Amino acid sequence: MDYDEWVKSVPVEIRNDSLWNMEAYRLSLFLSDPGWYDVTKLMSDKRTLGLSDQLYRSLGSISANLAEGYSRGTGRDRARFYEYSLGSAREACDWYFKGRHGLGELVAEHRIRFLTQIVRLLLTMIPHQRSYRIGEPEEKYFTNKQELLEDVPIPK
């Protein structure tokens, strides 16, 4: 099923929610459908049973955290849940890479491409939601060792 066909199959109630306008959310929902089949295939081999559970949880967590974050009232709260979603998307990439032998290289590459697109969108969205720049302050870190040593009590 291609993306356009899939969109038509999504219930109208979901498509009418303003959350549907978020591309990362739509992509994560779309990926959860083929992901279901991937997980089912991985479950059939006892060597990849644990991997299938991890993949299922990380794929589900992407859209769930996007929905949770979208419902938050402040940008900082939204950014926190979008960061959780980012972590889950990166984790799913990792599990797909590890499961590529059971799923096939083409399947894993396809899914990783979708996940990479979600990661890129989230890396743009998260700083935008925050009211401050992510990163270290520009001040230089230094200490005056002599002042520090003068205040150190010496045990007797």
Image (cartoon, grey):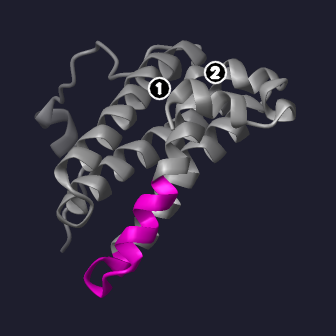
Name the residue furthest bottom: 46
Q: Is residue 145 left or right of residue 8?
A: left
The C terminus lies in quadrant: bottom left
Task: State the residue at coordinates (50%, 37%).
Answer: 83
Residue under the image location 21 percent in, 40 percent down = 148
Question: In the depicted view, which residue is nearer to us: 68 or 59?
Answer: 59
The answer to whether residue 74 shows anywhere in this view is no
Q: Is residue 42 above or below residue 140?
A: below
Residue 44: x %, y % from top left: 38, 80
Whether residue 132 is visible here, answered yes or no, is: yes
The label shown at residue 22 is 2
Residue 122 shows which numbered tag?
1
Residue 141, quarter of the rendered image: top left
Q: Residues within 10 Å of mark 2 (few under 14, many from 20)?
A: few
Q: Residue furthest left?
A: 146
- How far apart in space, not on screen, are marks 2 and 1 (Cα)? 10 Å
Residue appearing at x 54%, y 48% in the figure: 32
Q: Residues within 10 Å of mark 1 (few under 14, many from 20)?
A: many
Please state which of residues 3 and 84 is positioned toward the viewer in this rendering.
3
Which image quadrant is residue 15 in? Answer: top right
Q: Amino acid at mark 2?
A: Met
Residue interval drawn in magenta: 35-50
